[in-house]
Image: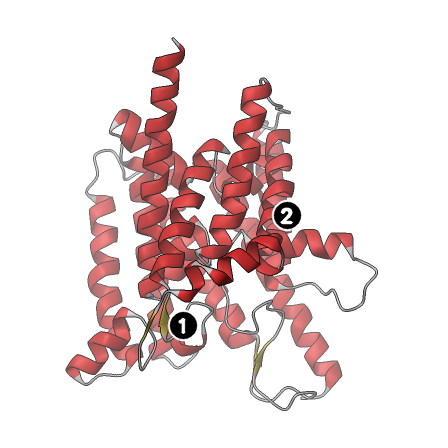
Amino acid sequence: MDISLLKALTTQVLWAAFVLSVLFGAIAQRTHFCTMGAVSDIVNMSDWTRMRQWGMAVGVAMIGFYMLAVAGLIDPAKTLYASNRFIWLSASVGGLLFGFGMVLASGCGSKTLVRIGGGNLKSVVVFVVMGVAAFATLKGITAVLRVATVDRVAIDFASNAALPNWLGSAIGLSPAGAGLILALVLGLGLIVWALLGRDFVRFDNLLAGLGLGAIIAAMWWVSGHLGYVAEHPETLQEAFVATNSGRMEALSFVSPVAYTIDWLMFFSDKAKVLTIGIVSVFGVVVGSAIYSLAARSFRWEGFRDAEDTANHLVGAVLMGVGGVAAMGCTVGQGLSGLSTLSATSIVAVAAIVAGAVIALKYQVWRLETST
């Protein structure tokens, strides 16, 4: 493949990622899909509807990912989440920070982008602060702290630290084959669990669960198959075009926010190029804005008072730091990471939920003490 063909392929990959993320933003805006909201509904109202949306989306993404793997269209060992290191402490600490922060900031990374598309100015502030905190944790002052502390603690395995690899080794199957078995059992289990929910079978709920899960699976195909180059014309090595990590990626909204701010700030630097993560950030905002304007639900919203501002600022910092430490957010580790059945993703998501519950309990305590 020569350079001109590579550039054309990169353009195709970026447009495909942008279109999928526009759909993600529009569906999330319409259906009020939100992991933080789902946890809040359970804690405050014992309502599991939005959590069932999330569970169905994970199930669909999981099945889609391993169907692509078994078909030979993608390689599970080459995703961003595939690693021999089980970074359980980073996932736990980062997940707790992110979960607590997303409650203070009124939503996770993806919800922040969806809110921006709906006219929420508070989320613009969260976007900037989270992006700066994330970049500092990728390459700056908090990156030094991260590398010197939580990153040092890990369990090293002979193969990828993921459930399919462990099951495959035990029963003599390839990771892709074992993954498909697990995906069908766990994924279908989550889908059935969602469908059994009282009053769950409604258009918006099904759109959120089936639609967003399918978008994650489609993103894996775009990044891992369409964007795969067996021999890069410059490096002569295999490559996944238009990715920040150089590996197969799906949707995530912490590090990509940092890269988006970096791209905007250094736009004239030719070394700063568009990636799947960056165009996905723009796509979610655009998709949300299109639906908000079409549904006439777009409205400007600002901070209520100084305390509201402080909560969002602190929450944004916690999400930026925690999201990078945990290698993803509720979409990055939640939908994308869990679809690969990564052990680190399972720990990260559990910690995010725990952090959100703690923050919600904290907010109730603050309300009770203030009154």
Mark carried by residue 82: 1
Residue at the spot x=38%, y=33% of the render?
Answer: 359
Q: Using the numbered discs, state the Cα–Cα distance from disc 2 to disc 1 in whole angstroms.
A: 26 Å
Which quadrant of the rendered structure holds the C terminus? top left
220 w.r.t. 298: above or below: below
Residue topped by disc 2? 132
Closer to the camera in the image, 291 or 279: 279
Closer to the camera in the image, 110 or 265: 265
Instruction: Give the amino acid at mark 1.
Output: Ala
Q: Would you identify the image quadrant in which residue 313 lies? A: top right
118 w.r.t. 19: above or below: above
Mark carried by residue 174: none
Give coordinates of residue 316: x percent, y percent. 55, 39
Give coordinates of residue 235: x percent, y percent. 66, 88
Instruction: Give the amino acid at mark 2.
Output: Val
Left or right of 327, for residue 59: left
Closer to the camera in the image, 349 or 367: 367
**Between disc 2 and disc 1, whose residue precedes?**
1
How would you rate the neighbour count of disc 1 (Cα within 10 Å): few for under 14, some for 14-19, many for 20 or more? many
Q: Residue furthest top?
A: 371
Q: Secondary structure at mark 1?
A: loop
Residue at the spot x=36%, y=41% of the render?
Answer: 355
